[in-house]
Amino acid sequence: MPATSTTTSPTGSTLTHLEGSLSGRRYDADRLWGPDPADGRPLLARYDLARAAETLKRETLARRTGMGLWRWRELLPVRDWASVRHLGEGSTPLLDAPGLGRELGLPRLLLKAESLNPTGSFKARGMAVAVARALELGAGSLVAPSAGNAGGALAAYGAAAGLPVTVVMPADAPSVNQREVVACGAELILVEGLISDCGRRAAEIAATTGAFDLSTLKEPYRVEGKKTMGFELAEQLEWELPEAVVYPTGGGTGLVGIWKAFGELETLGLIGSLRPRLYSVQAEACAPIVRAFERGERFAEAWEGASTSAAGLRVPSAVGDFLILDALRESGGSAVAVPETELAPMQRRAGSAGAGYVSLETAAALAGTRMLIESGRIESGERVVVFDTGAGYKSESC
Ligand SMILES: *Cc1c(COP(=O)(O)O)cnc(C)c1O
């Protein structure tokens, strides 16, 4: 038998190993891992940053176009291009929002337009990278619980990779998310309950069928895709980070990823030690991170009876809670809970002020920004970046 010919096309990834975020233990990166076997907490990808610095430079980056988040390939885990299915994820614009900025009393407001990603939310970044890496490491099928957008993104990237996908969603997840999962050929399972109940169901499916479980922060690579938001932010602001970043927080991979990105960029010598203050925004009826922040706790107790119309924020407990809380505190930021009654009105206000049709999660972040200005935690002259995490039409139910 002739040897199978395999053409390789290396990405230049400098991934070296995985590290337990709490245990500090070291694991082989080139096999599939769930959470840290030592404590069930997230595993984080580590890179040879000195080697990455040799090729990942301001000038080389400027020449890399048309490949979205894969421009940051040295600091991504995928080793060979053969596993990558680029649907357009990443390289979203950082937009001035003068009308909305005037309304909020924040003339230097900027919106990072994550709603322009494939599948209409930043979840595409995480799934693009995690699905590519799962394919590379030999996963045969995929499963994940989702409040909405993660499921749609998983279904889209799973289909592109040719891997069967199962998505477990709460029955009250936005119908638009349910339809996109089915349209992308995935199996949709609806559960009467919250995302945490869906997580248990997904774990059972993984255990019985051998599907790889892509739950938030229970595998190491979705956060790697999401950290590219932090890379782009630094580059788009000419390597001078803003004073504050406001992020609508559910499972927290967005914030955790951005914080990790800044650390890596500093080691590479691309930015200095100045960091923005990070602010986490949650909905008043599901605010476990805000409560833990205010109590001075490092871990967040699960929230009972979680409810909010912003599906992406309906996350009663996060495995990466301490990573979120550490980042908020180290950055000098904080966490704020917004009343449910402010979400829909803020969505209309943002649209009328020329910021487009934003999701309810983005509206929550904007309402939180207003509260932070009113309480003096953000000053009107500061440069503030609000993450517009999803498009308005992704919040719709019928
Ligand atoms: C998932 C999601 C969030 C929450 O992001 P995390 O990184 O899970 O905290 C915010 N907005 C939208 C639109 C989402 O889909």
Image: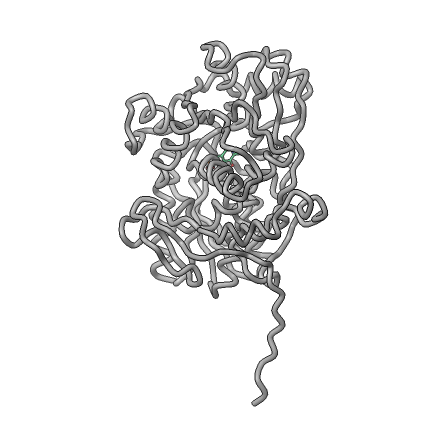
At which x and y percent is residue 268?
54, 44
At which x and y percent is residue 135?
52, 61
On screen, residue 239 above or below 104: below
On screen, residue 214 above or below 327: below
Q: Along the horizontal axis of the image, is 271 left or right of 22?
A: right
Q: Along the horizontal axis of the image, is 28 left or right of 269?
A: left
At which x and y percent is residue 380?
56, 12
Q: Residue at x 56, y 36 (%)?
A: 271
- Name the foreground residue: 284 vs 217: 217
At which x and y percent is residue 138?
48, 66
Q: Residue at x 69, y 20 (%)?
A: 354
- Name the foreground residue: 186 vs 303: 303
- Name the foreground residue: 234 vs 345: 234
Quadrant in which residue 366 is drawn:
top right
Q: Residue at x 47, y 16 (%)?
A: 341
Q: Is residue 386 visible?
A: yes
Q: Along the horizontal axis of the image, is 277 left or right of 390?
A: left
